[in-house]
């Protein structure tokens, strides 16, 4: 009986794999990025290297850079896999109303009409029907066996019920982890794109502004870089590496930077101590 259930489980469809969906969504996102957002008609003098036409949203999105198709890939993938899961779960419910099916099965089992339950499972199909039908097959086999005690028969039916359930679970749970992961990544990629855009904006301001604006915008630009890497807003990367070592015991970032600044003794610790004293800021801002 165990072999039969296993064969039935291997024949059962496990849905669509997420990997080819991600590849197709990436191709679609790149096509939209280059040929829709990057359409020359969206830009001044029909040149994508120029600024977008005033009020042209598509051209503005194109200027978001390579982060845009990456975020679109994640969005298209989540939408596609969500639709696939809805279809798969609808199939798992079976052809008829699930609540009515369960009520009928309970009624037939109370009457001892096993054949009626089997027929109802064949008509219903779906996950619940497959599990019940598999358990009924085991029940019929152990009922005809006089060498087994009542407890052993119950154990055999319960074991087959658990095995049949485990065979159905992959069909219902497939791609759910991928959807959850990509949803989280989509938020983080959007934040990363925002931070990168702000870094570029303030970096451009620092190269074109006056003396005070240079100091201000350069500091903000550096702060955004560190924010992107998970540091404090006014913290340099060297100080962040020392704090990772002191608070979390993570040593490899500190070792790398200390090696790069080999002429300074314990560079990361010195950077952290100097920032505590505010020495990383211009004199006018201390």
Image (tube, rainbow, N blue to C red):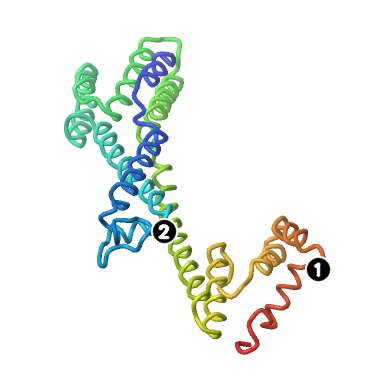
The percent position of residue 31, horizontal first and vertical second, equals 33, 43
Disc assigned to residue 160: none
Which residue is nearer to you in this view: 167 or 54?
54
Number of residue marks: 2
Which residue is at a point 24% across and 19% down the rendered structure image? Answer: 118
Q: In this view, does 212 lie to the left or right of 169?
A: right
The residue most toward the front is: 45
Label 1: few (<14), some (14–19) or many (≥20) C-alpha neighbours in 10 Å:
few
Label 1: which secondary element: loop
Label 2: which secondary element: helix
Which residue is at a point 81% across and 68% down the rendered structure image? Answer: 264
Chain-order first, disc 2 or disc 1 = 2
Q: Distance between the residues labelled 2 and 1?
A: 37 Å
Q: In the figure, 115 relative to 180: above or below?
A: above
Q: In this view, does 63 lie to the left or right of 265?
A: left
Quadrant in which the C terminus is drawn: bottom right
The percent position of residue 117, horizontal first and vertical second, equals 22, 22
Q: Mark 1 points at which residue?
A: 264
Which residue is at a point 66% across and 79% down the rendered structure image? Answer: 280
To which quarter of the image does residue 269 belong? bottom right
The percent position of residue 192, horizontal first and vertical second, equals 47, 60
The percent position of residue 202, horizontal first and vertical second, equals 49, 73
Q: In the figure, 177 relative to 51: above or below?
A: above
Which residue is at a point 33% across and 58% down the rendered structure image? Answer: 61
Which residue is nearer to you in this view: 244 or 138?
244
Q: In this view, does 265 lie to the left or right of 160?
A: right
Disc assigned to residue 190: 2
Q: In the figure, 212 relative to 25: above or below?
A: below
């Amino acid at each position: 009986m165990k072999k039969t259930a296993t064969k039935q489980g291997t024949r059962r469809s496990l849905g669509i794999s997420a990997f080819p969906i991600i590849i197709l969504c990436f191709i679609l996102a790149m096509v939209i990025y280059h040929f829709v957002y990057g359409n020359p008609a969206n830009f001044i003098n029909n040149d994508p290297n120029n600024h977008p036409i005033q009020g042209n949203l598509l051209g503005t999105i194109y200027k978001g850079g390579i982060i845009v198709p990456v975020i679109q890939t994640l969005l298209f993938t989540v939408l596609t896999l969500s639709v696939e899961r809805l279809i798969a779960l609808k199939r798992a419910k079976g052809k008829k109303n699930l609540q009515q099916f369960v009520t009928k099965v309970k009624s037939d089992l109370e009457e001892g009409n096993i054949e009626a339950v089997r027929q109802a499972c064949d008509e219903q199909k779906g996950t619940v029907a497959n599990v019940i039908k598999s358990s009924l097959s085991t029940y019929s086999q152990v009922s005809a066996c006089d060498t087994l005690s009542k407890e052993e028969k119950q154990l055999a039916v319960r074991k087959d019920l658990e095995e049949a359930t485990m065979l159905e679970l992959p069909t219902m749970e497939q791609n759910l982890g991928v959807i959850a992961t990509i949803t989280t990544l989509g938020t983080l990629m959007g934040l990363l794109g925002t931070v990168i855009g702000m870094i570029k904006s303030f970096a451009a301001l620092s190269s074109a502004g006056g003396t005070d604006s240079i100091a201000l915008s350069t500091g903000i630009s550096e702060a955004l870089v560190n924010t992107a890497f998970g540091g404090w807003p006014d913290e340099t990367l060297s100080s962040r590496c020392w704090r990772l070592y002191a608070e979390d015991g993570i040593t490899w970032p500190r070792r790398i930077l200390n090696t790069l600044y080999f002429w300074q003794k314990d560079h990361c610790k010195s950077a952290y101590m100097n920032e505590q004293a505010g020495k990383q800021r211009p004199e006018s801002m201390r």
